[in-house]
Image (cartoon, helix red, strand yellow):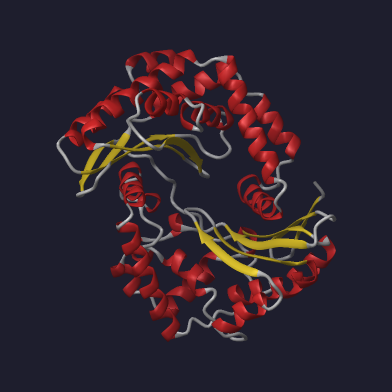
Amino acid sequence: MNVKITKLDSGLTVVTDSMPHLETAALGVWTGVGGRDEKLDEHGISHLLEHMAFKGTTRRSARQIVEEIEAVGGDLNAATSSETTAYYARVLKADVPLAIDVLSDILANPSFDAEELEREKNVIVQEIGAAADTPDDLVFEHLSELAYPDQPMGRSLLGTAQTLATFDRNKLRGYLTTHYHGPDMVVAAAGAVAHERVVAEVEKSFSGFESSSAPKPSPASFGKGGSRVVRRDLEQAHLTLALEGVPQRDEKLFSLQVFSNILGGGMSSRLFQEVREKRGLCYSIYTFHAAYSDTGFFGLYTGTDPADAPEMMEVIVDEMNEAVETLTEDEIARAKAQMKAGLLMALESCSSRAEQMARHILSYGRPLTVDELVARIEAVTVTSTRDAARGLLSRSRPAVVALGSGRELDKAVTQAEGLAKPKARSLLH
């Protein structure tokens, strides 16, 4: 990797990774603001702002924005998460200055045209409806709400039809001005790029952003857990479970990720082998861990026949409790190999490199090197993984949501109380 970093007077960080063998470049603007920064009356505004970025500026119409990029064979996109919003492009190396100009234009000079705004709010209302009609999306919305009650982390990024209706151009502009500040923004580029040239273009195009840091969101707090059954007339029962994980900078992060991979990270995982291969109870089952700045979210998802839901949850609980104490060296080695392969394969993509660098700067203040990341993975042991798993099971009461029909769902969610047994708690201390 050929990583170079420059911090501008505005506080904005420019980071590049030159890959001379490529003819294309991936670049974007990552901002440290997302759904968790929203007040209650701003619910959904981060996502709407992302949509409106492509709907016209004082220099370009919505059509001109996409036509200029697509005329050179490039593409534009954006994404909103709980803690970040990203706007990015992929272009040929000669068109990097154009991409930087367009990206700066949509953030520095948005027009927030009233007609475009109403149209886009309606588009998001349709998106909300689509999510409500997608069971595996809907069940996670309920799970987040149960895991992080009465706080932004537990709310859908899409907002509601009611909150969207209250947003006008002044509210959007106010939110942009409040949260899009130089010290909380990273321009990252990877591929066929020259660092000095990127810095010069960014310095010219992004000079207007505030040099003070934006306000920080309130700390997240994982709730008291519990269960919820959402009744829907569906063929399958969708079962989800959440536990409080660890933050991005926690020393246990990599060990907990190894545990998640062993438990439900692939076809060789314990849950996949036991639940699907041996018992035939489901088509899909997986676990994951999402780390944030001050909290972590360990999640599990599966779908099964409603009549099998109690057995499914019983097996899940037994496997999780059992795995904590019976992890093997072979399982640890396999999970570490999967993590290293995923890391190194991602480095073959300039888009992945740009995103990783930006996220590392927002999380750690600098990009972590490949050697550092591999070393952290290699440092994981059976002992550290068991300790991380015991902490996971004892840190919080599980939040469980079942979506579907039938009385068996009520029985299924109560099975999750078998997690965080006194055994796990006592072994932690």
Q: Residue at x 54, y 15 (%)?
A: 328
Q: Position of residue 299 (x, y in %)?
A: 41, 37
Would you identify the image quadrant in which residue 89 lies? bottom right
132 with respect to 110 (left or right): left
Residue with the most extreme left position:
407
Left or right: 93, with 220 as reference point: right
Q: Is residue 429 visible?
A: no
Q: Is residue 15 left or right of residue 106?
A: right
Q: Nearer the viewer, residue 216 or 224?
A: 224
Quarter-of-image position of residue 62: bottom right
Residue 129, horizontal then vertical, whole percent:
31, 63
Q: Residue at x 53, y 83 (%)?
A: 111
Quadrant, the C terminus: top left
- Left or right: residue 91 versus residue 144 is right
Question: Looking at this view, is 20 or 112 the one in front?
Answer: 20
Q: Which residue is depicted at the point 19% across and 30% down?
A: 411
Horizontal and vertical percent position of residue 338:
61, 32
Q: Is residue 364 visible?
A: yes
Q: How many marks?
A: 0
Residue 361: x %, y % from top left: 66, 50
State the residue in front, 144 or 279.
279
Residue lying at 83% horizontally and 67% vertically, measured from the top left: 197
